[in-house]
Image (tube, rainbow, N blue to C red):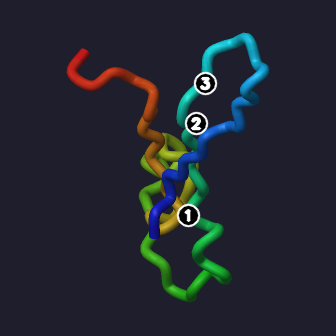
Amino acid sequence: MKRMKEYTPYHSPNDPCPPIGKKYYSTPPQLYIPFQPANLPQYSPKEALAKGTLWPAFYDYYDNPYRQRGN
């Protein structure tokens, strides 16, 4: 399932500003899991606090699509 989505905002021919280009957004993993299955593996309490969730299935690492690669 592709969680990073993209779209191109509409640019009017009469708009004096240059086109913005593609915009990106990510959707969280819980949108693709309709219910919480029983016996999901869990992080340790310390790791869960650092990651913001108790279950690895719901962890979503954010990778900034606008950041220049290699810098």
In the rendered structure, are the residues bearing label 2 and label 3 in contact, judged by CB atoms less than 8 Å apart?
A: yes
Q: Quadrant of the C terminus?
A: top left
Packing grade of label 3 (10 A; few <14, some 14-19, many >=20) is few
Q: Earlier in the sequence, mark 3 or mark 1?
A: 3
Q: Using the image, determine if residue 18 lies above or below residue 38.
A: above
Q: Earlier in the sequence, mark 1 or mark 2?
A: 2
* Kind of residue sitting beneath label 3: Ile
Q: Using the image, determine if residue 38 lies above or below residue 51.
A: below
Residue 28: % across, % down:
59, 57
Packing grade of label 2 (10 A; few <14, some 14-19, many >=20) is few
Q: Residue at x 43, y 74 (%)?
A: 41
Q: Residue at x 59, y 73 (%)?
A: 32
* Mark nearer the viewer, 3 or 1: 3
In the rendered structure, are the residues bearing label 3 and label 1 in contact, judged by CB atoms less than 8 Å apart?
A: no
- Left or right: 45 as drawn, with respect to 28: left
In the rendered structure, are the residues bearing label 1 and label 2 in contact, judged by CB atoms less than 8 Å apart?
A: no
Q: Using the image, determine if residue 34 lies above or below residue 71.
A: below
* Kind of residue sitting beneath label 1: Pro
Q: Using the image, determine if residue 19 lies above or below residue 58.
A: above
Packing grade of label 1 (10 A; few <14, some 14-19, many >=20) is some
Residue furthest left as drawn? 70
Residue furthest bottom as drawn? 38
Q: Tally the numbered discs.
A: 3
Q: How far is disc 3 from disc 1 in space, using C-alphas?
A: 28 Å
Q: Quadrant of residue 29?
A: bottom right
Residue 20: mark? 3
Q: Residue at x 71, y 37 (%)?
A: 10
Q: How far is disc 1 from disc 2 in space, using C-alphas?
A: 20 Å
Q: Residue at x 44, y 34 (%)?
A: 65
Residue 29: mark? 1
Residue furthest top as drawn? 16
- For label 2, the residue is 23
